[in-house]
Image (cartoon, helix red, strand yellow):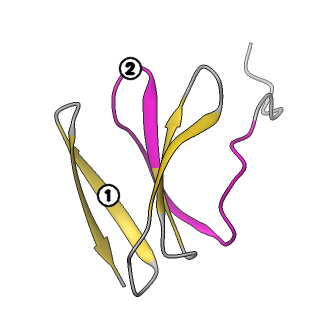
Amino acid sequence: MVSGECVSAFQGHDDLINYVTEMSNDNLVNCSDDYTLKIWDINSLKCIVTLKGHNHYVQYAIVNGDTQLLNDTK
């Protein structure tokens, strides 16, 4: 049954989330206005890695297979 109730949350970004996509069966990636991308373990809800170095908001990410990640900034 779908209730719309939040049952878990990923916490770690310092600003708005712009995009979320599945990277593999166990990982997802999200992009933020805090100039970072984060890769998360879906099962533990923990951040695996934070990708830093962007000079602007990160708008989206495209996953090509299970290992390649492309992204764009504003």
Image point (16%, 33%), residue name: 65
Point out the image quarter for the N terminus: top right
Image coords of residue 42 (percent x, y): 55, 27
Residue 14 in the image: state x and y as whole percent: 69, 69
User: Residue 70: percent from the left, percent from the top?
Assistant: 21, 58
Q: Is residue 15 magenta?
A: yes
Rendered view: 40 above or below 13? above
Examine the rendered structure and indicate whether residue 2 appears above or below residue 27. Answer: above
The earlier-in-sequence mark between 1 and 2 is 2
Measured along the vertical axis of the image, is residue 15 above or below residue 42?
below
Q: Looking at the image, which residue is at 43% across and 68% down?
A: 52
Q: Which mark is residue 40?
A: none
* Quarter of the image where the C terminus is located: bottom left
Q: Amino acid at mark 2?
A: Asn
Q: Residues within 10 Å of mark 2 (few under 14, many from 20)?
A: few
Residue 61 — which label? 1
**Residue 60 position (above or below residue 62):** below
Q: Which residue is mark 2?
A: 25
Give the residues drawn in magenta, as a range.
9-29
Horizontal arrangement in the rendering, residue 56 relative to residue 68 (left or right): right
Q: Secondary structure at mark 1?
A: strand
Residue at the top extreme, as displayed? 1
Is there CB contact under 8 Å for labels 1 and 2? no
Looking at the rendered structure, the secondary structure element under dot 2 is loop
Q: Tell me where residue 37 appears, x and y as whole percent.
A: 45, 59
Q: Amino acid at mark 1?
A: Ala
User: Is residue 64 a member of the stretch shown in magenta?
Assistant: no
Left or right: 69 as drawn, with respect to 4? left
Q: Residue at x 23, y 30 (%)?
A: 66
Left/right placement of residue 63 relative to residue 41 reads left
Residue at 36 percent of width and 64 percent of height? 60
State left or right for residue 37 relative to residue 23: right
